[in-house]
Amino acid sequence: MFVIVEGIHDTGKSSLIEKICQRQPYKLFQSKRLFPELANINNSSISDFATGTNCAIVWFAQTFSQSLFIIFDRLHLSEYSYSRLFRDVDEVIALNRFRMIDDKLAQFNVRMIHLHCNYDILVGRLKDKNKQYTEEHHNKLTDYFNKLIEITKITTYSIDTGKCSEELTYEKATDFIAKGIV
């Protein structure tokens, strides 16, 4: 079974994934874009690279999803949202890429957990890590994610990590995952 953990930065994705991988038979696949220098090559785009990565994951899901337990740290919701906000990818192009991946993944045993929290909680976490994100960034990213949560074909469960402890988030997430294992 494949599980995708989505959400904007500092909502608790890494903490949840770490707990799941420690306590469950899941292996982590980090689909974060690890090659930002590709975005600077003429006639190239990090989003094009990311789309290729996501397509490879679809093939991987089709071929191996019944026999492996893989958890993904972000995937196509993040790609859409961050490419729209920070890489200025056209809405139509970004949405078409999202739908292409979403339609294919929905055919397999895939479950998605969407973590979110309000801006005040996020700011407290960001200060701990000394990062700077504006409330406008938070609101736009949240709007993008919410739009996709409404249209995704993948069974999704949203958890407000501002209202749940790490342990409660883990319990809710694993209960949701267990319902998808047949």
Image (cartoon, grey):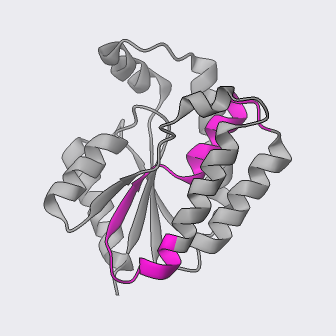
Q: Is residue 3 above or below residue 33?
A: below
Give percent across and percent down for residue 146.
Answer: 62, 47
Give percent across and percent down for residue 142.
Answer: 59, 37
Q: Quick one: which residue is furthest to the bottom in this view?
A: 182
Left or right, 166 with respect to 76, comes to left
Image quadrant in which the N terminus is located = bottom left
**Residue sitting at 48 percent across and 81 percent down?**
63
Region in magenta = 60-89
Tell whether position 114 is magenta.
no
Q: Is residue 39 above or below residue 109?
A: above
Front residue (pair 118, 75): 75
Left or right, 7 with respect to 138, comes to left
Can you tell which quarter of the image residue 101 is in? bottom right
Q: Quick one: which residue is furthest to the left in this view?
A: 23
Give percent across and percent down for residue 70.
Answer: 35, 65
Residue 173 visible in the current orientation: yes
